[in-house]
């Protein structure tokens, strides 16, 4: 199963993705330091940049679905005909920046990083993976946006604001995805020696079923 990993950071989620049996074809983050950690770790696991994976350090706002798929199609594992180019990407994973949502911070509604989850949705709409997984801090659940404009031009202009999870689910529904109710999970319940709660969002393309995510229910 093939995956794309956006806002990949140093690769925490990637470890789980790989352990679950996914092959990460493309990943991206803007930070130079996390690039070193991410690429070094993946080299240890047999990932060869340009051959069976592609990492791009860039601003997500500069990424397009066409560019990502071009990078994937040009990987050596496909150009040397050892593997067939996938018709579909199985899943896109992503952890958009959490600083503006975190209850531990200032929770500045105008933090420009808050808007990067919109870029995540845009790329999903351009690539159309079968499944979508997004992670963020608990504060994402009770953050409101005012006068937010979605990727299709829909306006969320309720005078009392609209909860960000509601916007996320509506946007995914609009571009052809069914969404499951988000859940807050504690990493300490999954073998991690740290209590760290995160909200997890899962969606699946309307022509797919829940076969890969039945445990969620």
Image: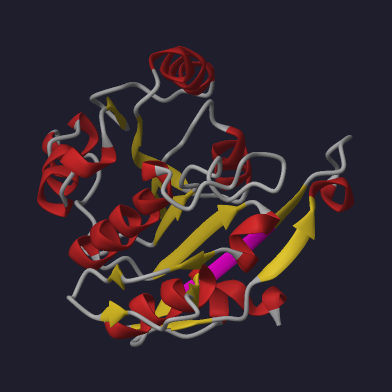
Q: Is residue 34 above or below residue 159?
A: above
Q: Position of residue 92 (x, y in %)?
A: 40, 56
Estimate the x, y position of residue 121 in percent, counting from the top left: 32, 62
Determine whether, in the image, residue 14 is placed left or right of residue 113: right
State whether residue 151 is above or below residue 157: above
Q: What colouring style does the render use?
A: secondary structure
The residue closer to the viewer here, 168 or 111, is: 111
Magenta part of the protein: which range? Answer: 199-203
For image coordinates 18% across by 63% down, the residue present is 126
* In-front residue for pair 190/29: 29
170 in magenta: no
Given residues 35 and 169, the one toward you in this image is: 169
Name which quarter of the figure residue 196 lies in.
top right
Is the residue 86 above or below the residue 213 in the image? above
**Residue at 17% across / 53% down in the picture?**
65
List x then y, in percent, for residue 167: 43, 75
- Please tell me which residue is depicted at 58% across the width and 47% down the height of the picture: 107
Query: In the image, is 70 to the left or to the right of 137?
Result: left
Residue 214 shown left or right of residue 163 in the figure: right
Q: Is residue 1 visible?
A: no
Is most of the magenta stretch helix, strand or loop? strand
Q: Residue at x 83, y 39 (%)?
A: 192
- Judge whether residue 146 can be spotted in this image: yes
Residue 86 figure quarter = bottom left
Q: Height in image: 81 above or below 119?
A: above
């Amino acid at each position: 199963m093939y995956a794309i990993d956006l806002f990949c950071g140093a690769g925490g989620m990637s470890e789980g993705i790989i352990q679950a049996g996914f092959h990460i074809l493309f990943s991206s983050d803007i930070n130079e330091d996390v690039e070193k950690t991410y690429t070094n770790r993946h080299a240890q696991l047999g990932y060869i940049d340009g051959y069976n994976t592609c990492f791009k350090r860039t601003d997500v706002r500069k990424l397009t679905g066409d560019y990502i798929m071009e990078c994937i199609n040009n990987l050596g594992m496909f150009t040397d005909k050892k593997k067939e180019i996938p018709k579909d990407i199985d899943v896109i994973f992503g952890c958009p920046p959490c600083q503006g949502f975190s209850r531990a911070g200032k929770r500045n509604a105008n933090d420009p990083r808050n808007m990067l989850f919109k870029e995540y949705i845009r790329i999903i709409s351009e690539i159309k993976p079968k499944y979508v997984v997004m992670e963020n801090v608990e504060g994402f659940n009770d953050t409101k946006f005012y006068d937010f404009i979605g990727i299709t031009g829909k306006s969320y202009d309720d005078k009392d604001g609209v909860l960000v999870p509601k916007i996320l689910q509506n946007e995914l529904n609009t571009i052809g995805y069914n969404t499951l109710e988000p859940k807050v999970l504690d990493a300490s319940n999954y073998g991690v020696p740290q209590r760290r709660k995160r909200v997890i969002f899962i969606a699946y393309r309307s022509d797919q079923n829940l076969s890969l995510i039945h445990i969620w229910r």
